[in-house]
Structure formats: structure tokens, C-alpha cells
Image: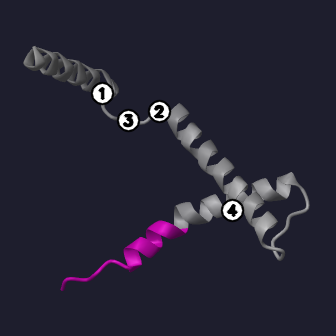
Amino acid sequence: MIRRADKLLNQRSIKRRRARRPTNGGAVSRGVLLKVFLIRWVSNALALVVTSFLLPGVWFTDWTACLLGALVLGLLNAFVRPVLLFLTLRSTF
């Protein structure tokens, strides 16, 4: 009885894994990229708001300044991080 239940559970998990495979060859759609961008942007903005409440030297005048600062932090993270990762790779020569 237990073996049969384990077998059914295993078959269901295999079907779920097959159903989750993308049909477009693994390419990520624009909608998914936009969602990821917006989530990161909002999380950066929330981090700036929390930082401004915790540290007296950090402040912003209005919400547009906060959102612009979050956008700048996101762009810096997107472009500077890969360069820093490349520069910190060990050389094995």
C-alpha cells in the first residue's frame, strides 16, 4: 500500500516537472523580465525608505527622489557588479 502511494506521488511530481518546462526553448518573456525589474526596483525603494528612517543622515525630499535613487542603485548593481565579479576572478596561469 505504501509503495503504491509512493509510486503515485513520484509519477505526479514527474508530470508537474514536465508541465513546468517552457515551450519557447527556455527563452524568458518580456513580461517576466518586467516583473523582475519592478520587484527589484520596489525592493530598492523600500530599502531606501527603511534606511532613511534608521539613519539620520539619509533623507529624501519626495517619493520621486526615492524612486530615482532606487533606479540608480539598480542600474549600478546591474552594470558594476559583473565588472567587479570579473575583476575578482582568480587567475590560474
Could you say where residue 16 lies in the image, as x and y percent from the top left?
28, 22
Q: Which residue is mark 3?
A: 27
Q: Which mark is residue 72?
A: 4
Tell me which amino acid carries mark 2: Ser
Tell me which amino acid carries mark 3: Ala
Q: Nearer the viewer, mark 2 or mark 1?
A: 1
Q: Earlier in the sequence, mark 2 or mark 1?
A: 1
| Display coloring | one colour
Q: Please give the name of the residue rendered at 61% of the width and 44% of the height, measured from the top-left corner.
A: 39
- Is residue 73 shown above or below 45? below
Q: Which residue is mark 2?
A: 29
Compute the Cα span from label 3 to label 4: 27 Å
Quadrant of the rendering where the C terminus is positioned: bottom left
Residue at disc 4, secondary structure? helix
- Is residue 53 shown above or below 92? above
Magenta stretch contains residue 29:
no
Residue at disc 2, secondary structure? loop
Res 4 quadrant in image: top left
Q: Earlier in the sequence, mark 2 or mark 4?
A: 2
Q: Which residue is mark 1?
A: 21
Could you say where residue 34 lies in the image, as x and y percent from the top left?
58, 39
Classify 10 Å Cα crowding around label 4: few (below 14), some (14-19), many (20 and above). Answer: some
